Image (cartoon, grey):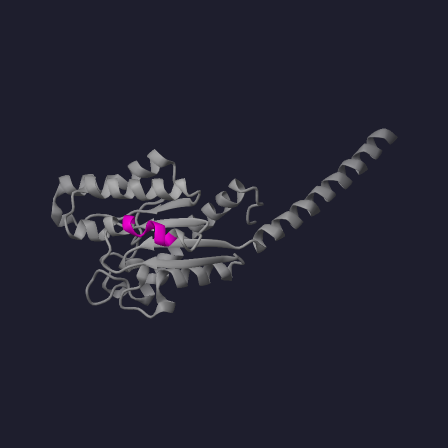
Amino acid sequence: MKLGKGYGRFAAAVNSLLMLLFCAIAAHAQDAPVKLAILGDSLTAGFGLKPEQALPARLEAALKAEGRNVTVVNDGVSGDTSAGGLDRVDWSLGDKPDIVMVELGANDALRAVDPASTERNLSAIIEKLKAAGVGVWLAGMMAPRNLGPDYVRAFDGLYKRLAEKYKVPLYPFLLDGVAQDPSLNQADGLHPNPKGVDVIVQRLLPFVNRNLDLHAASVHRAPHP
């Protein structure tokens, strides 16, 4: 009986020590900065918005409000296609990001670019980023429905194919909850207004938090509680 009680006290002490150690490691991990770049088009660049209203700035603010030490870099160029993004990968890597979220393809669809070409470009972007040792996330888009069912099927499906092929996290549709809502878009009906950006951030945040934790685990950091 005495042995059992002694062991119980010892086990409790060990568990308390381990918990303190975990908390110390977790606190250190939360202090470790992470640089997340978004390689994208006007949806990233913040077309028609002030710099502080653009998606990267609003996402960074939301992450910092949750205690995340994350810098979000705006690597968006209005009007850019997947081909243009491929040309800019080395430029984006110059910022030495830990993670790059690829947000490209909307302009390809608006110009009815062959989805196979878009898929090849995005594939090359992912391969270049992975070769540089950078984490890769993918933000999906959807084709305008007036391009017909064959085009829509080919385009919409390419993001899932790429995510599965390269085993990268996929946020299925960046404009989820915002597309075609006049109250959340600018007069052109294509670009979100500040309120629309905030909706995107709100919906995107769980995906970002989850994958930041996975990234932390992959580099032997403790996950965010």
Above or below 73: residue 150: above
Residue 169 in view:
no
Quadrant assignment, res 7: top right
- Horizontal side of 8 relative to 67 (left or right) equals right
x, y percentage for residue 14? 75, 39
Magenta span has 90?
yes
Above or below residue 143? Residue 5 is above
The percent coordinates of residue 185 (x first, y second) are 25, 64
Start-end of magenta stretch: 86-92
Main secondary structure along the magenta-highlighted residues:
helix
Of residues 129 and 38, the one nearer the viewer is 129
The quadrant of the image that shows the N terminus is top right
**Rendered residue at 27%/68% (across/down):** 48
Q: Residue at x 25, y 52 (%)?
A: 84
Is 43 on the left-hand or right-hand side of 5? Answer: left
Residue 41 visible in rendering: yes
Q: Is residue 76 magenta?
A: no
177 lies above or below 1: below
Depth order, front residue of 15/3: 15
Counting from the top left corner in percent of width and height, residue 216 is at: 52, 45
- In the image, residue 152 lies at what x, y percent? 18, 43
Q: Which is more toward the observer, 156 or 215?
A: 215
Which residue is at 36% across, 60% downward? Answer: 55
User: Most extreme residue toward the bottom, as rendered?
Assistant: 50
Vertical comparison of 86 with 3: above or below: below
